[in-house]
Amino acid sequence: MTGPTPAPGRRFRTVCDRLPGVSGRRRDHEGPARLGVWLRPDDQGAAPGADVAVYASHAEAVELCVFDGPGPGAGERRIELTERVHGVHFGFVPDLAAGTAYGLRAHGPWDPARGLRYNPDKLLLDPYARGIAGEVTWRPEVFGHVVGEDLAGDPEVRDAHDSAAFVPRGVVLDDGFDWGEDSPPSVPWSQTVLYEAHVRGLTRLHPGVPYHLRGTYAGLAHPATIEHLTRLGVTTVELLPVHAFTSEPALARRHTSNYWGYNTLGFFAPHAAYSSASVPAGVLTEFKGMVRLLHAAGLEVVLDVVYNHTCEQGRDGATLSWRGLDNRAYYRLDDNGRDVDVTGCGNTLDFRHPRVVQLALDSLRYWVEHCHVDGFRFDLATALARGRDDGYDPDHPFLVAMRSDPVLSRVKLIAEPWDVGPHGWRTGQFPPPMTEWNDRFRDAVRTFWLPDGARALRGEPGHGVRELATRLSGSQDLFGVGDRGPLASVNYVAAHDGFTLADTTAYEYKHNQDNGEGNRDGHDDNRSWNHGAEGTSDDPDLLERRRRSLRNLLGTVLLSTGVPMLAAGDELGRTQRGNNNAYSRDDLVSWLNWDLADWQQDLLATTTQLLRLRREHPALRQRAFFGGRPVHEDGTFDLGWFDADGRAMDESRWHEPRTRVLQAFLHAAPAGGRSLLLVLCGAGQDVEVTLPGPPWASSYELVWNSAEPKPVDPTSGHDGVQQVTALSIRLYAATP
């Protein structure tokens, strides 16, 4: 059923009571101090109420819809925001109190070819709502255009059904919170160890967390969780999206949900399902309490944020907020009003528009200033920096604003340096002070630890050790310009997206059948090795080889120059049963299992030992690139490379694709502490390795050996020829 396109001047339907418009005049130059709904302070003798401001530049009018309760059947009152300037509709609304549920309705032309999709029959969520009540019910009413029960239809024809009963509402909040003596841990990048975690998945099965707190903000900040994180030795928890989000309609039809959260519904509100509280004010309080407790334990909180797209999908998607307020301003459109998608999610927020840049900056500042978070990881960051010609611009206004902002320039800023649009891969090209996920590190490390036979079967070229050496020493080829340094590289071999670390040693092919997409989703280029059998096995020799490979991958990440990142559970050998795209698996596939076998306890101890070694040895935490320069009067370099025979690597050895052993001597002089020797043996058989002798070192102390299933005490007096186990790593501390 459709309704007519509103004629000029016919702006309001009269299906419910409407309050008189907010008194005031249309202003030509003055505007509100900020967007959203903000209570007036009651200590200034002002009348109770709230300032309301909404950006909708192409709308003829905007109404604030106030509900007398949180449920879908609550009565609705409409208040026109009669003041307007620079596309912002605003006014002071008396007697608007904390806890009030509200929404918006926008009136204007329905002209999809011009990108205008106004429909006052659709209740819209305030883009600046800091509290959100309710969820999206995927019914035809939530679409601005006509759709059938299968949610497919004609994006050109406006729908006249009211959506209020099927969409969430904003909730007015009082932002007061007792932060006590909270202060940010401010961990230097050189000491940072990132730990990527999911709020729900981390504690959903944790036996030390009370059942009613598992999978919540409070559960993440419970003493049992904090004890694990601090004992492990990580410094910074990087949380998968906690902005309010919803599931896609396709997932709802399959009776599943979006588990990861990369489908934003609100950029200012914490996701309510991760809270043990039942009201939005309690959700925000619980989130802030989590941050405060993590800070007290010395742990930073970094949020994975998704500003590249929203949950409204493409032009055939729902009208929930931005599309109904100003589709032409918020989204990147072509000349026919169709969405330009460089995210793979149906739409792309248009960071060429000043108000979109403002939305993101306001959101980021809110989470820092009001919620005390310590930084952000930007999903598909290239999409945020595409300029007028649609190409990537390192001097994009959004990036410049973050770099120069007195609040944001002081927190951690991490880019996922790609999107799915043309020329979207931009690793190494983001400006300082941003750091970047280094996918080249991931791929090089996984490839090196593949045996020769596995690489040949996949058609992988033999690169010897050249690529590995570049990644071990900080990826200067990627981050050597702009005075960035090795700390711009976030080194990882596993993340939420793809195989878990354990699954890279047990599966060569993705097993995503239970995702409901015919195993078509997820990466096919996994660079993994199952050691001779796909999936689970009870062969003790095969299992030991897999576990040694796990230790090799962990050791390579944690002993390399740069900023290491672990995915939560990799220290426990967590498996997703070969699923490399578990975005919709809110179940045992994704949740961490804390019932650990002996080998998992050993792996946890090994990871803890590696992180302790990283803390104790400054040579592993370089702030500048190695220069290959003499650092001592004996002529030794800051970084020395040697082959299995203890000879300095030369041009021919670097270009020999069959080279499978590499020794890296990290001199203590630049950073202090002891000099270290890292020996990586990628050969398929045990190898005799000659350790570099004087002037580099007179002898060595073996401090870690990946061939050992669990940590052992260091042993000294090592020199000359050593028998090194196939596919293993050794770390020695040098004696001058």
Image (cartoon, rainbow, N blue to C red):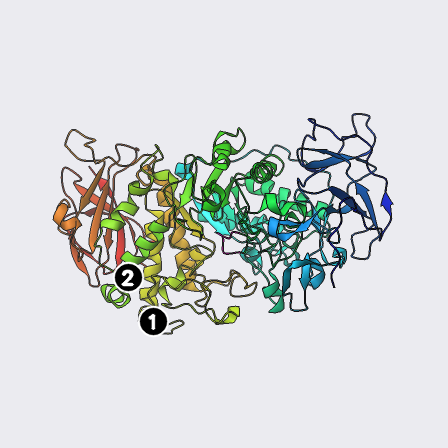
Can residue 177 be seen by looking at this rendering? no
Helix, strand or loop under label 2: loop
Q: Are marks 2 and 1 in contact (CB under 8 Å)?
A: no
* Point 61% across, 37% down: residue: 366
Assess whether residue 342 is covered by the magenta stretch: yes
Q: Which residues are magenta?
A: 340-345
In the rendered image, residue 550, in percent from the top left (x then y), is placed at: 35, 59
Q: CA–CA distance between discs 2 and 1?
A: 20 Å
| Label 1 crowd bin: few (<14), some (14–19), many (20+), radius 10 Å | few
In the image, is residue 9 above or below residue 214?
above
Find disc 2 in the rendering and name its residue. 450
**Amino acid residing under circle 1:** Pro
Kindly report which numbered mark, 2 or 1, lies closer to the viewer in this rendering. 2
Q: What residue appears at the point 34 percent right and 71 percent down from the top-left corner?
A: 540
* Percent of width and height locating residue 91: 76, 34
Q: Is residue 606 left or right of residue 88?
A: left
Report if residue 64 lies within the magenta region.
Answer: no
> Viewer-proximal residue, 149 or 200?
149
**Occupied quadrant, residue 95:** top right
Name the amino acid, label 2.
Answer: Leu
Q: Earlier in the sequence, mark 2 or mark 1?
A: 2
Describe residue 538's horizontal placement relative to residue 519 as left or right: left
Q: Which mark is residue 540?
A: 1
Q: Quadrant of residue 445?
A: bottom left
User: Where does residue 242 sit, x and y in percent of width and height?
Assistant: 58, 49
